[in-house]
Image (cartoon, grey):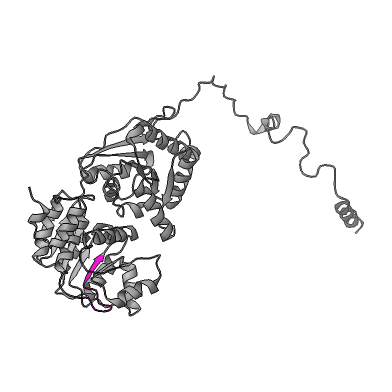
């Protein structure tokens, strides 16, 4: 079995890996690191939670051990789709580069430009950024990319989903064509394949799992749900969620609950707190400092339930998440793979449960087609509302149908509830004096 000591990494990097408690690389690490150290482009395809971050962080630190960065000219560039994922890469860099003198800068939204510019002006070896903030600095004239030796694109399929591909292509064109490119994705959509064919040169392809597969150590299930009435759907759906959590008992040590819309994230978190569950929301509309604070609470174990939008689906690296609850079926099938990949990480087992409304069955079918399996159906834990069946209706004696009256009989119809038979229609006999006067004046005329 391959060990990190067999991968020709810098001794200082090996010492940091040992201090972190790791001895054996994951399959994607064992496949990607040797090719990266040889200076080759790498195309890594693996499901989330397989250790892709270390696959490029470790060889990058080793390759950059010699040399020095110049002001505003980073030596390497890591692009990540979200602030959380960029911050995660920065944390990994700090762990594995602690015995070196390499410097880094993190360019993400929610942080002042001035602080980031100060770091860039000093010169950094590793620049970790989201595409939008990186281009903002470039357009301000504060950053040059002509010195980039190694460029990393992480979670490329998420970049595609978020509409970053034009930005990625522009950034590629701003870097030297002699750069080394490390490109990682969980799925290979046609657009992603086009990008790799354009910007990667004879890459070493490392694929440790079939594209768009879910981890075998994740137990999955879906509850088919239909509300008794449309106006009660939200209330009853949240009741089902609480029942699913309760049914898991002590096995559910912590969980991420995914919603499709930011408003539902807030509503879901508020509802859980109302019923005594320790929960907090996280989505793109929250202030960056607030988001990072909530994430830290979840990592520390002081927060049990994290209600999230897809902004967190690929930006969290918390090995010990026991459960993922999909409160909503994701609109894009690939997002299901990434959502449930938040559990069952680092060799642990995990459980992923989803609530599927009748109108979401099309999206459920798309997910099952993508992952090439039928997600096992789980019985609705709320017995009062059966899945996709009409709620029971009390039987009542059928009232005799009243024969339709002809136009001539309409005067005999009983008045409706809103109008009494003897009620006055219009003004009745109470004609205002000014109207009466006008009639008299007309007659006199």
Side of 170 where 328 appears, left or right: right
Q: Nearer the viewer, residue 271 or 390?
A: 271
Q: Is residue 70 magenta?
A: yes
Q: Residue furthest top?
A: 397
x and y percentages locating residue 334 in the rendered image: 27, 50
Side of 185 where 269 appears, left or right: right
Q: Nearer the viewer, residue 425 or 167?
A: 167
Side of 374 where 294 appears, left or right: right
* Total numbered labels placed on residues in the image: 0
Residue 283 visible in the snapshot: no
Q: Quadrant of residue 277?
A: top left
Report the magenta residues as a range: 69-78
x and y percentages locating residue 120 in the rendered image: 30, 75
x and y percentages locating residue 371 in the rendered image: 22, 44
Q: Is residue 344 magenta?
A: no
Q: Residue furthest right?
A: 444
Against 208, is 287 above or below? below
Secondary structure that dominates the magenta span: loop
Q: Quadrant of residue 147?
A: bottom left
Residue 65 visible in the snapshot: yes
x and y percentages locating residue 220 in the rendered image: 27, 38
Q: Residue at x 8, y 50 (%)?
A: 2
Q: Residue at x 20, y 63 (%)?
A: 99
Quadrant including the C terminus: bottom right
Q: Nearer the viewer, residue 332 or 321?
A: 321
Against 402, is 283 above or below? below
């Amino acid at each position: 079995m391959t060990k990190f000591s067999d991968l020709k990494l810098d001794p200082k990097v090996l010492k940091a890996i040992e201090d972190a408690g790791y001895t054996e690389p994951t399959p994607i690490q064992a496949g990607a690191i040797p090719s990266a150290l040889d200076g080759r482009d790498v195309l890594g395809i693996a499901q989330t939670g397989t250790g892709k971050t270390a696959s490029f962080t470790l060889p990058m630190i080793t390759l950059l051990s010699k040399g020095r960065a110049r002001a505003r000219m980073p030596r390497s560039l890591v692009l990540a789709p979200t602030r959380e994922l960029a911050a995660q890469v920065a944390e990994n860099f700090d762990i594995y580069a602690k015995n070196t003198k390499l410097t880094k800068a993190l360019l993400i939204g929610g942080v002042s430009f001035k602080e980031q510019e100060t770091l860039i002006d000093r010169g950094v070896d590793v620049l970790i950024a989201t595409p939008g903030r990186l281009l903002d600095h470039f357009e301000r004239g504060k950053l040059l990319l002509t010195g980039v030796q190694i460029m990393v694109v992480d979670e490329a399929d998420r970049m595609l989903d978020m509409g970053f591909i034009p930005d990625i292509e522009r950034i590629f064109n701003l870097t030297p064509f002699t750069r080394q490119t490390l490109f990682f994705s969980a799925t290979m959509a046609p657009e992603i394949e086009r990008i790799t064919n354009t910007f990667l040169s004879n890459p070493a392809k490392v694929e440790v799992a079939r594209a768009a597969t879910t981890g075998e150590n994740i137990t999955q299930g879906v509850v088919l749900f239909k509300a008794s009435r449309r106006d009660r759907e939200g209330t009853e759906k949240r009741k089902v969620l609480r029942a699913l959590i309760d049914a898991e008992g002590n096995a559910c040590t912590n969980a991420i609950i995914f919603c499709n819309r930011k408003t539902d994230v807030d509503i879901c978190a508020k509802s859980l707190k109302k019923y005594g569950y320790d929960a907090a929301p996280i989505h793109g509309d929250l202030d960056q400092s607030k988001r990072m604070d909530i994430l830290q609470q979840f990592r520390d174990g002081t927060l049990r339930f994290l209600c999230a939008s897809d902004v967190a689906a690929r930006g969290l690296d918390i090995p010990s998440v026991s459960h993922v609850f999909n409160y909503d079926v994701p609109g894009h099938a690939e997002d299901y793979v990434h959502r449930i990949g938040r559990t069952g990480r680092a060799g642990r087992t995990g459980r992923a449960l989803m609530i599927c409304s009748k109108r979401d069955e099309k999206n459920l079918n798309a997910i099952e087609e993508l992952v090439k399996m039928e997600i096992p159906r789980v019985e609705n834990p709320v017995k009062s509302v059966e899945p996709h069946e009409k709620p029971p209706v009390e039987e009542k004696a059928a009232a005799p149908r009243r024969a339709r009256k002809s136009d001539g009989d309409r005067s005999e119809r009983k008045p409706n509830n809103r109008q009494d038979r003897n009620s006055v229609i219009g003004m009745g006999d109470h004609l205002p004096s000014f109207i009466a006067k006008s009639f008299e004046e007309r007659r006199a005329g």
